[in-house]
Amino acid sequence: MSSAIVIGAGPGIGTAVARRIAREGLGVGLVARSAATVAAAEAAVRAEDAEAHGVRADVTDERGLRAALDAIVDRLGVPDLLVYNAALIRGDLPGELSTREHLDAWAVNVVGAITAAAQLAPRMIEHGGGTILITGGMPEPVPGVTSLSLGKAGVRALTELLERHYGPDGVHAATVTVGGVVAPGTAYDPDEIAEHYWRLHTQPAADWQREVLHG
């Protein structure tokens, strides 16, 4: 059975992407920090008549995140698609955060994605390839959201690194960059954004894109 894993499966983009994947008949593994979020995402996937397996994990806990991914693989198999949608979104001006606060934000926005990719990409390669998609944002840095601007710049660089490292072996890495505040019924409707993820996943190798900008 084909499957996918969505990390950061909260309301908004995470659940919308999970539902979009489920409509294609894939089983969906779901990772979120709270049990309530996991349960809601599982219910959304099952409403699309697809198998769901949710695991609670904090992306800043390397051991816990790796264990969660292993548990999903044991249940659903090696995924064809990994989506990393976790982010720490808050307002902060340059100099307002402590070193510890910046490191905490970086751990969520960037390092968790590195951990997940390193855990799953080699297995994807063994199974013939796959796709790693990371939710980006802040196409232009904004001083009022400094830590997020830095994190999304890191995501863009990380995608380039993953594509260069794993791309020759059949793993497509790309970023869906969202240029505004996500809300249903707006130009940044999560269901519309979710379409980018599926399109990137199904692109022929000759047409692989590294980034799609929504907005």
Image (cartoon, rainbow, N blue to C red):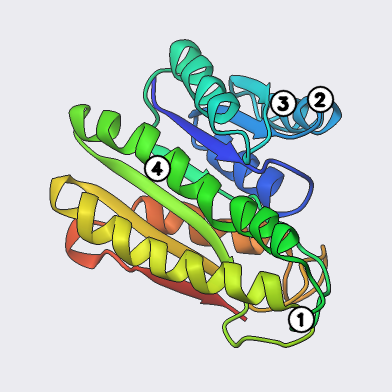
* Residue 201 circle label: none
Mark in the foreground, 3 or 2: 2
Earlier sequence position, callout 3 versus callout 1: 3
Q: In the figure, 58 relative to 200: above or below? A: above
Mark in the foreground, 3 or 1: 1
Would you name the residue on which mark 3 appears?
A: 42
Would you name the residue on which mark 4 appears?
A: 117
Question: Is residue 111 toward the left or the right of residue 58 in the image?
Answer: left
Residue 183 in which image quadrant: bottom right
- Bin the neighbour count of mark 4 within 10 Å (Cα to Cα): few under 14, some 14-19, many 20 and up: many
Q: Mark 3 and mark 1: span between their CA atoms?
A: 39 Å
Residue 141 in which image quadrant: bottom right
* Element under disc 3: helix
Residue type (three-letter) at the residue carrying disc 1 = Gly
User: At x 68% / y 58%, what residue is drawn?
Assistant: 105
User: At x 65% / y 78%, what residue is drawn?
Assistant: 179
* Residue 95 circle label: 1
Residue type (three-letter) at the residue carrying disc 2 = Ala
* Residue 67 visible somewhere in the drawing: yes
* Residue 137 visible somewhere in the drawing: no
Would you name the residue on which mark 2 appears?
A: 35
Earlier sequence position, callout 2 versus callout 4: 2
Earlier sequence position, callout 2 versus callout 1: 2
Q: In the figure, 35 relative to 10: above or below? A: above
Q: Mark 2 and mark 1: span between their CA atoms?
A: 34 Å
* Element under disc 2: helix
- Bin the neighbour count of mark 1 within 10 Å (Cα to Cα): few under 14, some 14-19, many 20 and up: few
User: At x 75% / y 43%, what residue is drawn?
Assistant: 10
Residue 208: percent from left, percent from top = 27, 64
Question: Is residue 125 toward the left or the right of residue 195 in the image?
Answer: left
Q: In the figure, 75 relative to 106: above or below? A: above
Residue type (three-letter) at the residue carrying disc 3 = Glu
